[in-house]
Image (cartoon, helix red, strand yellow):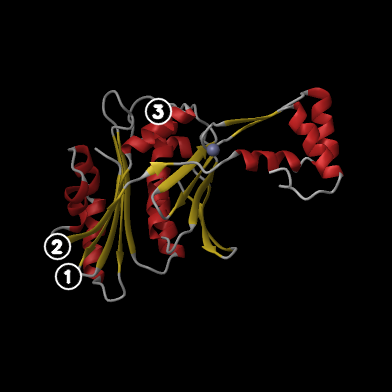
């Protein structure tokens, strides 16, 4: 199964459909972050949900989905754009509840906390919406977020289907929204199919693409587009140097006296940036001389 974002429409009942199949991307993210099975399952659910939120955004912008919870997982954040790229981090990579894989993620999240969605509306404007996290899955809580914070009637499902040997056997999500002229009954039918386990069961039997989407929207699905998905981090060396500059000349001299270098590990992609002694000295000189940052480049 190849990772895919599918955009579609059920014209008859005016429902908008977005589906993501993100198995490969989630397995890659699991390796990158070294995640134990339960941490991997929750993080994958968040990645698929984040990709759906990103695809719902207008124009070129970003959206963050974050969880702060009292369970052992503690928290996570995913950061998606509108083009099918996502990155994320999870606070506790080592959570594993052996046994029934449908129980582990709930236990890892705990019973209280906050689910937040931060939308970048462009031109420096942001919108933050949040709901109280209650016992359940990330997806169950995200449905409550949509009901409380978004103007559009929405049905949602995200599933991580484990197999015997692979906690991330298949990862997919779907969001169905009623357009202004859409049929409330048709959306209710979609919700009922999701509640009856239609999306979960279709994923488990290996359905993909249109067939997977039809498991919840029924016949009449018109595919408008297919796009690739990827785990992509936009960190770079310049940002790492900027982070060092934020220490100020005195802070940098203190580092020079002790460590002789600054090592910055990106928490999203694990890329390592090392700023060595000569460069640190130069940054300190530049800061003291009042030369604006970036003059070196
Ligand atoms: Zn990175």
The dot on residue 37 is 3
Category of crowding for the residue at label 1, using alpha-carbon neighbours closer than 10 angstroms: few (below 14), some (14–19), many (at least 20): few
Which quarter is ligand 1 in? top right
Q: Secondary structure at mark 2?
A: loop
Does any portion of residue 63 appear in the rendered image? yes
**Figure check: 200 above or below 118:** above
> Which dot marks residue 12?
1
Evaluate if marks 2 and 1 touch, with contact meaning CB atoms under 8 Å apart. Answer: yes
In the picture, measured across the screen, residue 214 lies left or right of residue 108, that is: left
Q: Is mark 1 within 8 Å of ligand 1?
A: no
Residue 232's label in the rendered image is: none
> Reading the chain from its start, which is encountered first: label 2 or label 3?
3
Nearest to the eye among marks 1 and 3: give it: 1
Quadrant (top left, top right, bottom left, bottom right) of the C terminus: top right
- Residue 74 in sight from this viewpoint: no
Cα distance between the residues tagged 2 and 3? 37 Å
Disc 3 is placed on an element classified as helix
Which residue is found at the position 22% from the left and 50% from the top? 196
Q: Residue furthest left?
A: 219
- Asked whether mark 3 and ligand 1 are closer than 8 Å, the reply comes as no
Q: Is residue 73 above or below residue 223?
A: above
Please give the residue where the numbered disc 2 appears in the rendered image: 220
Could you tell me which secondary element the residue under label 1 belongs to?
A: loop
- Which of 170 and 263 lies nearest the eye of the viewer? 263
- Taking the spot 27% from the left edge, 39% from the top edge, the residue there is 2
Residue 193: x percent and y percent?
21, 54
User: Label 1, label 3: how many angstroms apart (C-alpha)?
Assistant: 41 Å
Quarter occupied by the N terminus: top left
In this rendering, the answer to whether 276 lies above or below 243 is: above
Left or right? Give the position of 5 relative to 109: left
* Residue 262 shown left or right of residue 9 in the figure: right
Give the mark nearest the N terminus, 2 or 1: 1
């Amino acid at each position: 199964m190849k990772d895919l974002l599918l955009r579609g429409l059920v014209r008859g009942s005016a429902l908008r459909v977005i589906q993501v199949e993100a198995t490969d991307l989630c397995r890659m993210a699991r390796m990158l972050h070294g995640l134990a099975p339960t941490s991997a399952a929750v993080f994958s659910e968040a990645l698929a949900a984040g990709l759906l939120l990103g695809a719902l955004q207008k124009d070129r912008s970003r959206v963050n989905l974050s969880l702060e919870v009292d369970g052992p997982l503690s928290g996570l954040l995913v950061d998606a754009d509108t083009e099918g790229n996502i990155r994320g981090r999870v606070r506790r990579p080592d959570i594993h509840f052996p046994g029934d894989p449908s129980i582990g993620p709930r236990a890892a999240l705990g019973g209280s906390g906050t689910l937040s969605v931060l939308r970048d509306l462009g031109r420096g404007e942001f919108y933050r919406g949040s709901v109280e996290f209650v016992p359940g899955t990330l997806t169950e809580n995200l449905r409550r977020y949509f009901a409380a914070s978004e103007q559009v009637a929405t049905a949602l499902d995200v599933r991580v289907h484990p197999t015997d040997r692979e906690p991330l056997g298949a990862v997919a999500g779907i969001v169905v929204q009623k357009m202004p002229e859409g049929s409330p009954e048709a959306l209710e039918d979609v919700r009922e199919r999701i509640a009856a386990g239609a999306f979960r069961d279709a994923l488990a039997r290996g359905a993909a693409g249109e067939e997977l989407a039809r498991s919840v929207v029924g016949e009449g699905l018109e595919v408008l587009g297919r796009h690739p998905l990827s785990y992509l981090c936009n960190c770079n060396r310049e940002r790492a140097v900027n982070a060092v500059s934020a220490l100020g000349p005195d802070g940098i001299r203190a580092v020079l006296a002790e460590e002789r270098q600054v090592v910055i590990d990106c928490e999203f992609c694990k890329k390592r940036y090392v700023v060595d002694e000569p460069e640190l000295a130069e940054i300190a000189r530049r800061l003291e001389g009042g030369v604006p940052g970036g003059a070196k480049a």
